[in-house]
């Protein structure tokens, strides 16, 4: 029997992915695998629009609340854990609905990963200490000596990527640029997929949705959530969790560097920039594009998913029952 296809649902923030993923999972007898680099962190609930307990009790979700916000997650870890979750869902005869907006994670899952060494906390600490003494431009200059190809595509203050490139060099003794073409995880491991992207045709309407969503997060207590997290964990603004959109701006507000009005303006602007980057990724991705603002957009996605998941009789029966109501 053919493997159950995994439905990959991607798109820019605030385009309606979460609601559609839930509807697909309900109709197709599926479970959701989150593709969100912020929802992996425990406690980051309001600012990530994380599904609530009732929703997660109704539809199983995977790769949410994976680690504390003081820890780092990676595309490699995501791809490995997502493949396990997808295989488990298929073994239960259900449809994996793999949904979110972290496009790097989608690429790692569907195209494979470079064979890079694992993160080394002691080496990273050494690099951070050196950066504190000399500044990131000095480390960028060091990177240019050992890996000029990688250095040429990075800005001198791109701390996260400079750190990783130097870490690879110091751990493996090989330039990052020399390793990135080698694959350690095979794209074939994902199996059959249906790749759907919500691509809004009206950017103004999307921007309005982004503003409403950020306002809702502020009203729901984004700043208060971050204040509580800072009291519970040893957080710093350099941590990946604290660089997430919304939390970065809320951190500045709690530090007294910006007022509430500026927090809102910067948070909305940063979210719009995130959506722009997601559009850029989508243009280079082979997907079935669906305009969420088009009439009967959901019916279009449902019909496409029904056709792809027709290899699974249980999912098909559940779908037929749902559409007949």
Image (spheres, rainbow, N blue to C red):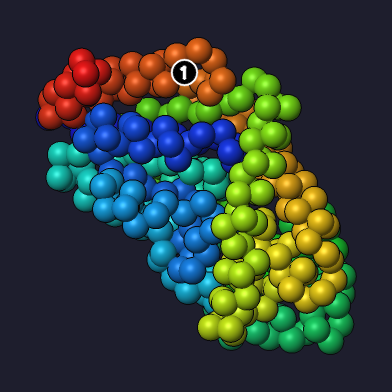
Q: Quadrant of the C terminus?
A: top left
Most extreme residue toward the top, as rendered?
Answer: 295
Front-lying residue, 69 or 154? 69
Residue name at image x 50 percent, y 61 percent: 45
Q: Quadrant of residue 255?
A: bottom right
Residue name at image x 71 percent, y 70 percent: 251
Front-lying residue, 144 or 119? 119
Q: Position of residue 126 (x, y in %)?
A: 68, 86
Residue 245 visible in rendering: yes
Instruction: Count the labels in the image.
Output: 1
In the displayed structure image, the side of residue 16 where residue 147 appears, left or right = right
170 w.r.t. 261: above or below: below
Residue name at image x 60 percent, y 32 percent: 282
Front-lying residue, 80 or 27? 27
Q: Quadrant of the N terminus?
A: top left
Q: Position of residue 11 (x, y in %)?
A: 55, 34
Front-lying residue, 171 or 74? 74
Residue 312 visible in rendering: no
Most extreme residue toward the front, as rendered?
Answer: 219
In the displayed structure image, the side of residue 140 where residue 268 appears, left or right = left
Q: Position of residue 118 (x, y in %)?
A: 50, 70
Residue name at image x 62 percent, y 55 percent: 219
How many other residues sit within 10 Å of disc 1, few (<14), some (14-19) or many (≥20)? few
221 w.r.t. 307: above or below: below
Mark 1 secondary-structure assignment: helix
207 w.r.t. 38: above or below: above
Read off the residue under disc 1: 297
Q: Quadrant of residue 156?
A: bottom right
Q: Position of residue 88 (x, y in %)?
A: 21, 50
């Amino acid at each position: 029997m053919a493997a159950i296809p995994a439905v990959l649902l991607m798109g820019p923030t605030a385009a309606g992915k979460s609601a559609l993923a839930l509807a697909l999972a309900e109709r197709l007898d599926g479970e959701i695998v989150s593709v969100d680099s912020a929802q992996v962190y425990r406690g980051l609930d309001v600012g990530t629009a994380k599904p609530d307990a009732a929703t997660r009790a109704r539809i199983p979700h995977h790769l949410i609340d994976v680690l504390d916000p003081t820890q780092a997650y990676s595309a490699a870890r995501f791809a490995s854990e997502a493949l396990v979750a997808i295989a488990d869902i298929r073994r239960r005869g259900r449809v994996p609905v793999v949904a979110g907006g972290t496009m790097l994670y989608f690429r790692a899952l569907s195209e494979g990963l470079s064979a890079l060494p694992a993160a080394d906390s002691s080496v990273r600490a050494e690099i951070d200490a050196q950066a504190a003494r000399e500044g990131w431009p000095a480390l960028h200059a060091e990177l240019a000596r050992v890996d000029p190809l990688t250095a040429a595509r990075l800005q001198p203050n791109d701390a996260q990527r400079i750190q990783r490139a130097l870490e690879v060099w110091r751990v493996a003794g090989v330039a990052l640029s020399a390793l990135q073409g080698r694959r350690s995880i095979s794209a074939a491991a994902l199996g059959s997929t249906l790749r759907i992207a919500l691509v809004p045709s009206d950017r103004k309407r999307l921007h309005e949705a982004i503003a409403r969503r950020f306002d809702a997060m502020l009203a729901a207590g984004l700043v208060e959530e971050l204040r509580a997290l800072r009291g519970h964990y040893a957080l710093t603004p350099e941590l990946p969790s604290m660089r997430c959109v919304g939390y970065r701006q809320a951190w500045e507000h709690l530090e007294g560097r910006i007022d509430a009005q500026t927090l809102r303006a910067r948070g909305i602007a940063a979210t719009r920039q995130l959506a722009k980057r997601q559009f850029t990724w989508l243009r280079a991705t082979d997907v079935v594009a669906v305009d969420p603002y088009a009439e009967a957009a959901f019916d279009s996605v449902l019909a496409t998913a029904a056709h792809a998941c027709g290899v699974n009789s249980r999912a098909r029966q559940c779908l037929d029952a749902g559409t007949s109501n």
